[in-house]
Amino acid sequence: MNHREVISRLKQLGKNTKPGYKEGMARFGIESSNALGVPLPEIRKFAKEIISSEGSPFGRKAPDVGSKLVDIEIGKNHELALSLWQTNIHEAKTIATLIDDPKLVTENQMDDWANDFYSWDICDQCCSNLFDKTPFYKKKIIEWIKSEKEFVRRAGFVLMATSAVHDKKAPDAQFIEYLPLIKQYSHDKRNFVKKAVNWALRQIGKRNISLHKHALALAKELRQTEDKTARWIGSDAARELERGDLRIRH
């Protein structure tokens, strides 16, 4: 399937969506000026059809090493993803994050896509579906949070949050090292940054019992600060991390 066929199908899906859906996206802070109005479940379902078998975002097992046919198909999905990302269509970019192969993603691609982020949902989908499965994500966290661009900095903190859930092999020390960075940038008042900082702190705190202690301590510290943004981040995180019914992942 080429990108023209993908876009044609997306346009048809958009026509079949109930009226008002696209307009409703704006109520959730989604930049929808270039959207077709296709719901995310439909996008995910379509992404499954594009790849020859269930792709990594949906649990596909790695193919047999040396399978030229499989390698070609994976390469085709990567090229298709790159092509779809270059369109101005919101749903096409989301599809790209779902069908691309993290083993073929380069640092340059990550930087280029991050600099293209214009809406929180594209940022979050890209980080959660694709970027946190690359070997570069830890490096990009450190680089991106230093950026003054709102969605690039957000992407760094989203990677903190999603890797706390997805990277099962990462040591606790990795996430403890993130806590001073959360504190450092907890004063960024921009809405999409502060929410990502808060998300990162909460997800680190829910990763396991040990990290919960460290994250809750920082949340309580921020809750007492005079800075309004940092105080909101700390209060909201502490409220969740102190809940009696909180489930800590192991």
Image (spheres, grey):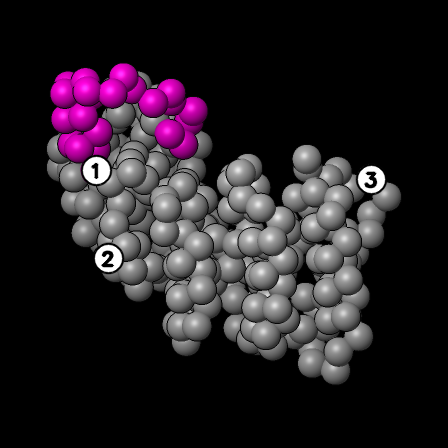
Query: What is the secondary structure assignment of the residue under circle 3?
Result: loop
- Height in image: 120 above or below 245? below
Inspect the image, locate mark 1, and give the three-letter code of the amino acid beneath it. Answer: His
Q: Earlier in the sequence, mark 3 or mark 1?
A: 1
Q: How many marks?
A: 3
Which residue has dot 1 on it?
Answer: 78
Residue located 43% across and 24% down the image: 59
Give the prevailing secondary structure in the magenta stretch.
Answer: helix
Tell me how far mark 3 sits from mark 1, CA to CA: 42 Å
Inspect the image, locate mark 2, and give the three-letter code of the amino acid beneath it. Answer: Asn
Image position of 33 (left or right of 181)? left
Give the label on residue 108, or none. Answer: 2
Inspect the image, locate mark 3, and give the three-letter code of the amino acid beneath it. Answer: Asp
Q: Closest to the observer: 14 or 95?
A: 95
Rendered location of residue 91, percent (x, y): 31, 43
Residue range of the region highlighted in magenta in the rendering: 56-78
Instruction: Give the quadrant of residue 60.
Output: top left
Q: Residue furthest bottom?
A: 226
Query: What is the secondary structure assignment of the residue under circle 1?
Result: helix
Instruction: Give the quadrant of residue 3.
Output: top left
Q: On the rendered image, what quadrant is the N terminus found in?
A: top left
